[in-house]
Amino acid sequence: MNKLKEIYEKNDKKWYIVQRWIMGKLFHIFEKHNIWRETIVLNLIKNFKNKKSFESILDVGCGRWWLLLETMKTLENVNEVYWIDINENRIKDANTLLKKTGKKVDVKFMDINNKVDYADGTMDLVTCVAVLEHVFEPTYLVEEFARIIKKDGVVIIEVPNIVVFFRRIAFLLWVRPRTSWDQGWDGTHLAYFTVRDLRNLLEEKWFIVEKVTGAWVFAGLRNWWVSMLSADIIIQARKK
């Protein structure tokens, strides 16, 4: 566990996207058409029909707090805000930053591989961006989300898409497709997902999938066929 913490904290010191090969060059050429994954998630939250009833939110290890801060502004009735991460450097920074919001924000160090340490049925919304691929057992984490989320509460999960077309091509060319250029073996990614995998996992664990979408360059066009064209997968699901 200490080694895992060390890797995440080292990654924190070089917080930028390293894009390589042909897809990296194309990303930089068309970067002005990029839509960040956090922006897509925030837009989903803004479109909630019953967002006035959302009072408690949990952001799981989302790193740089922009999503959490904007979610707090969007959900005006929220009065319980929780943020967890395994990176203790981020915990210190988050405590300093989030105190300035004037809202009570509970910031905790937590290893979600062991337990999501909240009571049953306490959360209206859980956001989990670029995290599920890092855990040892995604099924267990989704079960924990189902346990802590209230009936009719929402989870929004974002993960890389292992079968996007350019990763399929990499396989054909005998190249191991990467889903991250951070430190470690594939940026410490342990699990790989397709749309079908993630949808089935959520539906098996008491969620109804409401929206499947993706982010990054030309997201509007690529979302016509998320499974094949989108580099990531974003799913919004509601607890039964």
Image (cartoon, rainbow, N blue to C red):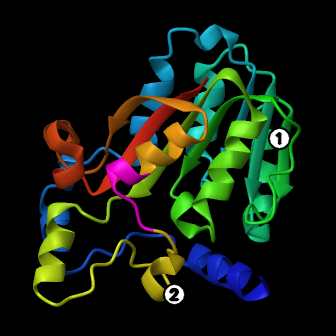
The residue indicated by pointer 1 is: 99
Tell me residue 148's x, y (percent).
77, 37
Residue 194 lies in magenta, yes or no? yes
The front one of 163 and 123 is: 163
Tell me the element at label 2. loop
Distance between mark 1 and mark 2 Cα atoms: 33 Å
x, y percent for residue 13 = 59, 78
- Residue 150 position within the rendered picture, expressed as x and y whole percent measured from the top left: 74, 25
Q: How many marks?
A: 2
Magenta span has 153?
no
Q: Is residue 80 visible to the viewer in this orientation of the structure?
A: yes
Label number found at residue 141: none
SS class, disc 1:
helix
Alpha-carbon neighbours of circle 2 within 10 Å: few (<14), some, or many (≥20)? few
Marked residue nearer the N-terminal end (1 or 2): 1
Residue 35 shown left or right of residue 31 in the figure? right
Q: Residue at x 80, y 65 (%)?
A: 114
**Residue extent of the magenta highlight:** 192-197
Residue at point 81%, 22% (across, down): 79
Give the mark toward the camera: 1 or 2.
Answer: 2
Q: Quadrant of residue 235?
A: top left
Q: Is residue 112 above or below residue 209?
A: below
| Disc 2 target residue | 184
- Residue lying at 74% horizontally and 60% vertically, measured from the top left: 112
The residue drawn where x is 67% and y is 15% is 76
In the rendered structure, which amino acid carries the disc numbered 1? Lys
Q: Name the image quarter holding the N terminus.
A: bottom right
Q: Is residue 91 left or right of residue 119?
A: left
Q: Is residue 232 above or below residue 28?
A: above
In the rendered structure, which amino acid carries the disc numbered 2? Gly
Front residue (pair 10, 82):
82
- Classify 10 Å Cα crowding around label 1: few (below 14), some (14-19), many (20 and above): few
